[in-house]
Image (tube, helix red, strand yellow):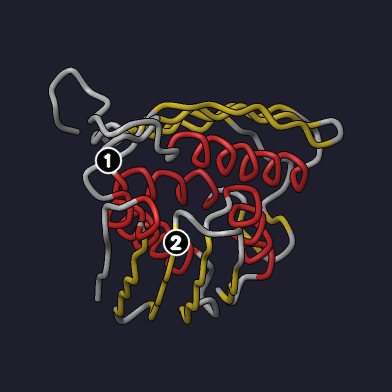
C-alpha cells in the first residue's frame, strides 16, 4: 500500500512488505517533527532508527516481525528495502529539493562523514570497520548492508566514512550523519527540478 504526494507538506508514504521471512509496515513523513514509533525486534536497530528520525525530522513508524530467531539479516535488509521504497514515493518528482548534501557528526572518539545525492541512481559505499561481531543484539556486518538496501530502493547515492574505536559510537555517529545529510538534501529550495536534464 502506497500513499504519497509531491507538495512540501504532503511528502508522505505508507508501504508494506510481507514475505515468508518478514512482515513489515512503514509510515513516513519527510516534513515531520522527528516523531517515531519503532519496533523491529532488534533493540539496537530500534535505537538507530529512532536516532535517524529524531535528527532528520522525518516522522517514522516502523513495525516489523521477522525471523530473528535465525538472525537479524532478513529483518534489517527488508526494512532497508521498504524504507527506501517509501522514501522514493514520498520524495515524489523531487521538484525544488536541494538534492545533494553532506554532514559530519562526532560522537566522543568517533566521527562519521556522509554525503548523499538524491539523483535517481543507486550507489552505496560505507567505509567502517568493526571490533566485534555484535553491537548489542544487532549483527555488525548487516549495518552497511542496510544502507545498501536503502540506497538501491530509494535510488540515491550514499557515501559514508567512519573512524573511531567504539563500535556503538561509530554506528550511532553514522546514522546521525546520514540523518543530517538527508534532512538537508530534502529541503525545498525553489520550484525547479535540480538537474540539467530537467528530470531526476
On screen, residue 31 above or below 13? above
Rendered image: mark on residue 29: 2
Percent from the top left, x then y, of residue 97? Answer: 35, 35
Residue 16 position by quadrant: bottom left
Query: Which of pointers 1 and 2 lies earlier in the amino acid sequence?
Result: 2
Q: How many marks?
A: 2
Percent from the top left, x then y, of residue 128? Answer: 61, 33
What element does badge 2 sit on?
strand
Residue occupying image coordinates x 62% and y 37%: 177
Rendered image: mark on residue 94: 1
Quadrant in which the C terminus appears: top left
Between 198 and 134, the one nearer to me in the picture: 198
Residue occupying image coordinates x 72% and y 55%: 135
Outermost residue, top side: 196
Quadrant in which the N terminus appears: bottom left
Percent from the top left, x then y, of residue 20? Answer: 31, 82
Left or right: where 27 falls relative to 118: right
Q: Residues within 10 Å of mark 2 (few under 14, many from 20)?
A: many
Between 106 and 28, the one nearer to me in the picture: 28
Between 182 and 198, the one nearer to me in the picture: 198
Left or right: where 35 falls relative to 2: right
Residue occupying image coordinates x 59% and y 38%: 180
Residue occupying image coordinates x 53% and y 70%: 71
Left or right: where 69 falls relative to 107: left
Amino acid at each position: 500500500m502506497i500513499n504519497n504526494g509531491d507538495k512540501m507538506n504532503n511528502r508522505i508514504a505508507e508501504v508494506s512488505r510481507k514475505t515468508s521471512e518478514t512482515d513489515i509496515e512503514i509510515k513516513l513523513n519527510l516534513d515531520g517533527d522527528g516523531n517515531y514509533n519503532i519496533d523491529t525486534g532488534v533493540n539496537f536497530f530500534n535505537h538507530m532508527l529512532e536516532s535517524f528520525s529524531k535528527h532528520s525530522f522525518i516522522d517514522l513508524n516502523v513495525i516489523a516481525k521477522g525471523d530473528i530467531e535465525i538472525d537479524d539479516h532478513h529483518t534489517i535488509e527488508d526494512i532497508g528495502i521498504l524504507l527506501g521504497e517509501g522514501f522514493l514515493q514520498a520524495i515524489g518528482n523531487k521538484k525544488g529539493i536541494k538534492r545533494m548534501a553532506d554532514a559530519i557528526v562526532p560522537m566522543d572518539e568517533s566521527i562519521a562523514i556522509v554525503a548523499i545525492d538524491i539523483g535517481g541512481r543507486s550507489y552505496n559505499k560505507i567505509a567502517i570497520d568493526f571490533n566485534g561481531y555484535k553491537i548489542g543484539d544487532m549483527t555488525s556486518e548487516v549495518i552497511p548492508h542496510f544502507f545498501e538496501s536503502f540506497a538501491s530502493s530509494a535510488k540515491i547515492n550514499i557515501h559514508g566514512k567512519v573512524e573511531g574505536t567504539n563500535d556503538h559510537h561509530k554506528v550511532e555517529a553514522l546514522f546521525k550523519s546520514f540523518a543530517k545529510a538527508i534532512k538537508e538534501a530534502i529541503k525545498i529550495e525553489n520550484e525547479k527540478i535540480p538537474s540539467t536534464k530537467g528530470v531526476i
